Amino acid sequence: MDANRTLKVQERENLRNIIAQWNANRLDLFELSEPNEDLEFHGVMRFYFQDAGQKVATKCIRVASSATTVTVIETLIEKFRPDMRMLSIPEYALYEIHESGAEERKLGDEERPLLVQLNWHKDDREGRFLLRRMDEKTFVTHQSLDDGTHFKRKLSKREKKEKKKREKIQKAKTIEEEEHKDGIADKLYTEMPETSFTRSISNPEAVMRRSRADVYAD
């Protein structure tokens, strides 16, 4: 019993750390709550809705980590299209779309969207959730689903630090390459012993004067 309790405490602590990392990279509106003893937490999620021939719509709703895809779809249909409530819900599905645009995955009925979203952070990815009919194709791209508030965010302190580090390394590498090229040229002139041949090449006018003097001497 104690072993199970210890394991659960450890799982909760691990989850808290992951949530803390997520919150550090998101706007306050989309911060996740602290997990309770049952490891359940809540958060506001943004969803997009694609309807044939219409502009893509977007809404934010509060979702529990225990909420399944089916439950979320029912709520979204009420939010996006109240007139569709009497229609067959299985006609609609929730898809996750990632930055590549070509990567699209339909969520299973028993999956939990909030957990799926949290895993994006663990895998260092970004994505969108799109609600659409299953008999239609996605005609929007990952970029076109960007509303400029949620995912198009400022870089986190960690990301800024890593970016600055990469730029610094790249700059140092470029300088090193330039210095290496210059160093080779310098060595050709400084390390090569000066001979009459190198002196002549460095002073072509002197060569011409000597040549004329030799001609007159003859």
Image (cartoon, grey):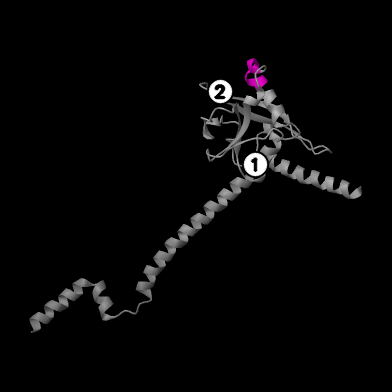
Sequence-wise, the earlier of marks 2 and 1 is 2
Residue lying at 67% horizontally and 18% vertically, measured from the top left: 85
The three-letter code of the residue at mark 2 reads Asp
Q: Which residue is mark 1?
A: 120
When asked about the image quadrant of residue 112, the answer is top right
Residue lying at 65% horizontally and 37% vertically, measured from the top left: 26
Residue 60 included in the magenta stretch of the image = no
Specify few, some or many for label 2: CA neighbours under 10 Å numbering under 14, 14-19, or 20 or more. some
| Residue at disc 2, secondary structure | loop
Residue 207 lies left or right of residue 169; in this view the side is left
Q: Which residues are magenta?
A: 77-84
Question: On screen, 6 above or below 145?
Answer: below
Specify few, some or many for label 1: CA neighbours under 10 Å numbering under 14, 14-19, or 20 or more. some
Residue 79 included in the magenta stretch of the image = yes
Q: Are marks 2 and 1 in contact (CB under 8 Å)?
A: no
Q: 37 or 217, which is in the foreground?
A: 37
Q: 107 or 41, which is in the foreground?
A: 107
Q: Main secondary structure of the magenta part?
A: helix
Q: Which residue is mark 2?
A: 51
